[in-house]
Amino acid sequence: MHSPIAVIGGAGRTGTIITRRLAEEGHRVRVVSRHPERALLPPAVDTHPADVRYAHGLGPALSNCRAVVFTVEPGTADSGPHSPETTVYDGVRNVLAAAADGGQRPHIVLVSQIYVTRREHPMNAYGRLLDWRLRGEDEVRASGLPYTVLRPSWLTDNNAAGARVRLEQHDRGNGWVSRTSVAEACVQSLRLPAAAGTTFELYNEPGEEPTDWAPLFGRLVPDRVPAHPGPVR
Ligand SMILES: NC(=O)c1ccc[n+]([C@@H]2O[C@H](COP(=O)([O-])OP(=O)(O)OC[C@H]3O[C@@H](n4cnc5c(N)ncnc54)[C@H](OP(=O)(O)O)[C@@H]3O)[C@@H](O)[C@H]2O)c1
């Protein structure tokens, strides 16, 4: 059987949908969670305890994985264990190091958010959330691993904004997207080669949900990866 796909945050709201969909597609799934005993997941899914803030537990959690989905809530403190710097910057770096240990080359799917390039946005007042998210994205893009970076707009638990999916690049938009659409985009990113090496925002709009994601991904412009992430100013 194939090696597993790790879903870090796979017991969360979007993460649970990703996990269920991957399991439905016949993949081996390993949910990485700080509290795996609390997770409500399909019986066939493995769980593994780990915390992205602490590198030591991630090696066993990510060993022999062919893909890693990172969908972790960042926290809003200015510093310390509940800050975006610790969770979505250090955390991403810890995950990349553990995932690539021993020469593994898993596909990394990072769930980020819109606004990350708009540092004047009020959300950046919360622990410099947007700056640190962007730094985490930059680490993924510069990692040399296959990757896809998703930037959901505001998340919903229904299709109030519609079920059609619109992908954008350049981070200038506003809107809503359902956790179901984001989860499906993660699953399809692992299936379709056109999603590799791309960064895109996700929105819903009135209409039907996509039956084929290939045309959506096919219109994306691949990232031009910087030699190395720049410093946070
Ligand atoms: N809310 C929005 O409008 C919005 C918009 C754009 C993007 N996003 C982002 O989209 C993603 C999914 O959002 P969601 O609302 O579906 O998430 P959620 O239900 O809040 O779940 C997030 C998961 O993060 C995990 N987590 C937190 N800290 C962790 C750590 N130190 N180590 C390992 N796992 C950790 C938690 O897992 P355990 O407790 O099991 O460890 C939790 O299940 C998040 O990154 C969110 O920030 C949200």
Image: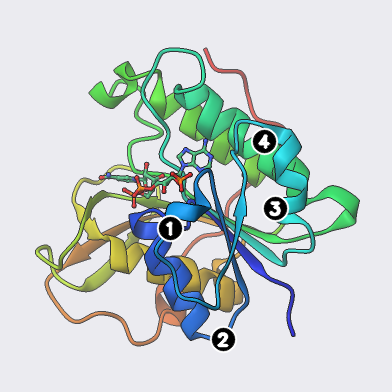
Instruction: Name the residue: 9% across, 64% down.
Output: 160
**Where ligand 1 lies, by quadrant?**
top left
Q: Residue at the right extreme?
A: 102
Report the Cα–Cα distance between label 4 and label 2: 29 Å
Residue at the disc numbered 2: 26
Amino acid, disc 3: Ala
What residue would you read off at disc 4? Answer: 93
Q: Earlier in the sequence, mark 2 or mark 3?
A: 2
The amino acid marked with disc number 4 is Arg
Task: For label 4, count other residues whose C-alpha is less than 10 Å away and answer few (under 14), some (14-19) or many (20+).
Answer: many
Q: Nearer the viewer, mark 4 or mark 2?
A: 2
Of labels 3 and 4, the one closer to you: 3
Return the residue found at the far front: 37
Q: Quadrant of the N terminus?
A: bottom right
Residues under numbered marks 4 and 2 in contact, where contact means CB atoms less than 8 Å apart: no
Secondary structure beneath disc 3?
Answer: helix
Position in image of residue 31 (x %, y %): 55, 60
Along the viewing direction, whichever of 47 and 84 lies nearer the viewer? 47
Observer-nearest of 7 and 190: 7
Residue corresponding to mark 1: 39
Q: Residue at x 65, y 30 (%)?
A: 229
Which residue position holds label 3? 61
Judge the density around disc 2: few (<14), some (14-19), many (≥20) Cα neighbours within 10 Å.
Answer: few
